[in-house]
Image: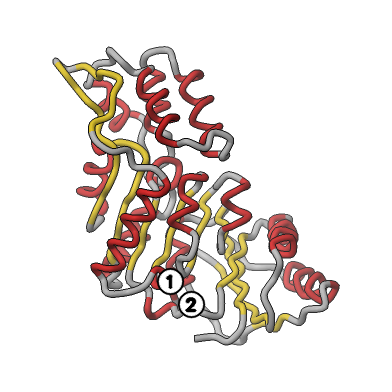
Amino acid sequence: MSKHLTLVALANSPISSQLKAALIAHARVLGIEITEENQERSHPKYFTVRWTCSQTLLAEARVAMRDIAATHDTDLAFLSPGFKPGEAKVLAMDMDSTLINIECIDEIADFTGKKAAVSEITEATMRGEIKDFKESLRRRVALLAGVSADVLDSVYRERLRHNPGAAELLSGANSGGLYTLLVSGGFTFFTEKLQQELGFKQTQANTLEIIDGKLTGKVIGDIVDGAAKNAYLEQACTLMNCKKINSITIGDGSNDLPMMHGSGISVAYKAKPIVKEKADAAFDRVGLDAALLLLT
């Protein structure tokens, strides 16, 4: 376990000496010294550089450093001194716009001509402007009343794609012995198929009510919101006889923040600003599988 904060730069191309100099210079302005590690860390797809920092960084400093890295087409992660990569036991992640490229509910609505109305609510919820996720989901699902259940399969076949690095991330996590959990405010129709494809150990999501081959506009049972996502993660940690700090979490919206808070490494994947600000890592350029580099 490192006694210092670790900064990790991740990129799809070699990391420039200009970026290294810029980060070191900015740290000095803050009165902080960062030292580049000599250890080389290889990956077939990505380039990475690490620095050690003798003290924690305020949120404003982290944002500024990420802005500097962005000008060099590089992502940054900040690993806390308390995290032990070798003791990670659980990977928990969101589905819509994180594991996959779409918001499934928006695409279902598109088949009915109501995508704009549903998307507006979705975006406001993910930005944190609508605080009650359960009410938000009920409002959106109600707009789907009368839609043929066949639309779900059409969305899956025609529009749903894994985000870059998804298959590699799950393969690496599963082979490394991590308990892989897909926990979503979306729908079981999609999470169950993704479990079969990618090998998640567990999936949790919402179940759409279907009667006579049509969506009723209702959800069956309790809704999976931010609190529920966190509860499922904590249950997985209990199952694996570990604490939350022994987990890695990945999400993009405000309802992912409860499960991300307190995990060993939280990764914001092409996320809303409110999530990036609070996450340990922000991936806007590298794929999901780059998270495996944070576990080495």
Q: Position of residue 87 (x, y in %)?
A: 37, 79
Q: Residue at x 74, y 64 (%)?
A: 61
Q: CA distance from mark 1 to mark 2?
A: 7 Å
Using the rendered view, name the quadrant where residue 154 is placed: top left
Q: Which kind of residue does numbered mark 2 sit on?
A: Phe
Q: Residue at x 62, y 47 (%)?
A: 273
Q: Position of residue 283 (x, y in %)?
A: 55, 55
Q: Position of residue 4 (x, y in %)?
A: 61, 83
Label 2: which residue? 83
Q: Residue at x 27, y 68 (%)?
A: 238
Label 1: which residue? 245
Seen as rendered, the residue at the extreme left is 212
Quarter the C terminus occupies:
bottom left
State the residue in front, 4 or 154. 4
Sequence-wise first label, 1 or 2: 2
Q: Position of residue 189 (x, y in %)?
A: 24, 35
Disc 1 and disc 2 in contact, CB within 8 angstroms? yes
Using the rendered view, name the quadrant where residue 245 is placed: bottom left
Using the rendered view, name the quadrant where residue 243 is placed: bottom left
> Left or right: 76 with respect to 154?
right
Q: Residues within 10 Å of mark 1 (few under 14, many from 20)?
A: many
Q: Secondary structure at mark 1?
A: helix
Depth check, mark 1 against mark 2: the one in front is 1
* Placement of 180 over or under 86, stated as above or below: above
**Disc number placed over residue 144 in the picture, else none:** none
* Placement of 24 over or under 95, stated as above or below: below
State the residue in front, 77 or 37. 77
State the residue in front, 35 or 21. 35
Q: Secondary structure at mark 2?
A: loop
